[in-house]
Amino acid sequence: MDFKQLTFLFEQAPIVKYVAFFFVFNLLLISIEFLLDFFSNKKRRWKDSWANVIIFFMNQLLDKTVVGSIGIIALVPLQHFSLFEIPMNFWTWVLAIFVADFTYYWMHRIEHEHRILWASHSVHHSSEDYNLTIAMRLSIVEGLFEWIFLIPMIIIGFTPFQAIVGLVLVAQYQTWIHTERIGKLGWLDEVFNTPSTHRVHHGSNNKYLDKNYGGILILWDKLFGTFRREEEKVIYGLTKNIKTNNPITINFIEYANIYRDVKKCRTLKHKLKMIFGNLIWKPKYFNTSDKN
């Protein structure tokens, strides 16, 4: 590492500090709610919560080693194809977070619309509880491919560092919204992703399915027609729940389901559509009982 690179890292120390502070603050919030629920005997699936904690530590181990390196290694060479060179200052950091939030909306939406991507993202939706530990319940393999969605930011002219940190901040913002302890927040629910709007996103009620994909801003959902207000009581979980607290099973059960369905397909076209198509598609020759 040369002097120029060391200078660059030193200059970025403040934003790294804020990311670390946000991370610790979120862990504190989760711990407080955890203790409040425990001592107030609030109804909660405790084995589910502990599974979320274990998945979190699995993620941290992988992100700090193999998985976390893949995105950086893949994105850095793409800087040579950037259309512009966006400098890093206060205003471009604000812009980077805004663009990362827009990127997150589409990444999140696409993960709900294609089964192979849903196989990993469904981990986050598979709990029948809704509390702050759900923010820890993230697929341990998502990091292998989610960096792909940052490519447009790099092509525009953001550095990989700014794009990745922007997306991390969008994700970290969402920790506090995984709770039932905060009700509706009036006009804030119309602009930002809040506990109320995100409860809708986690609902398996028919009217709530595939709604409210936003990260920080819920305005994207209003713009692209996926917004829904919290009205009826939210039923959390999947349309067909997995009924397990095993962290490994939670992470890979949908891949096993895809494999099972692919084996039943009679043509290559159907096999590919089963993997990359939408969640509910099945060939007509599948048994009615196999349909979601």
Image (tube, helix red, strand yellow):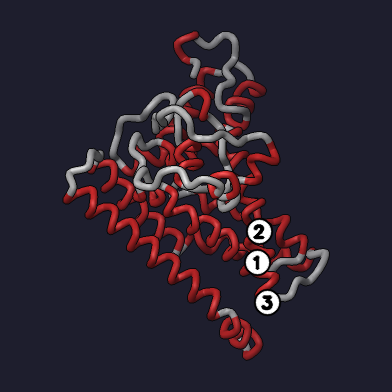
Q: What mark, if any, has residue 89 been given in the picture?
A: 3
Q: Quadrant of residue 83?
A: bottom right
Real-space Cα distance between discs 2 and 3? 14 Å
Reading the image, the residue beneath label 2 is 98
Quadrant showing the N terminus: bottom right
Mark 2 or mark 3, which has the lower sequence index?
3
- Residue 156 lies, in percent from the top left, at 77, 61
Say whether residue 145 is visible.
no
Three-letter amino acid code at the position of disc 1: Val
Question: Contact (CB < 8 A) between labels 2 and 3?
Answer: no
Distance from the alpha carbon under mark 1 to that under mark 2: 6 Å
Mark 1 to mark 3 CA distance (whole Å):
9 Å
Tell me where residue 152 sits by quadrant.
bottom right
Q: Determine which residue is flagged by label 1.
A: 94
Query: Tag count in the figure?
Result: 3
Question: SS class of the residue under badge 1?
Answer: helix
Which residue is at a point 76% across and 60% down the rendered structure image?
A: 155
Q: Is residue 189 above or below residue 92?
A: above
* Secondary structure state at the residue bearing disc 3: loop
Q: Say which of 248 and 103 sits in front.
A: 103
Residue that protrudes farthest toward the right in the picture: 83
Q: Is residue 281 above or below residue 21?
A: above
Q: Inspect the image, locate mark 2, and give the three-letter code of the amino acid beneath it.
A: Phe
Q: Secondary structure at mark 2?
A: helix
State yes or no: discs 1 and 2 in contact (Cβ < 8 Å): yes
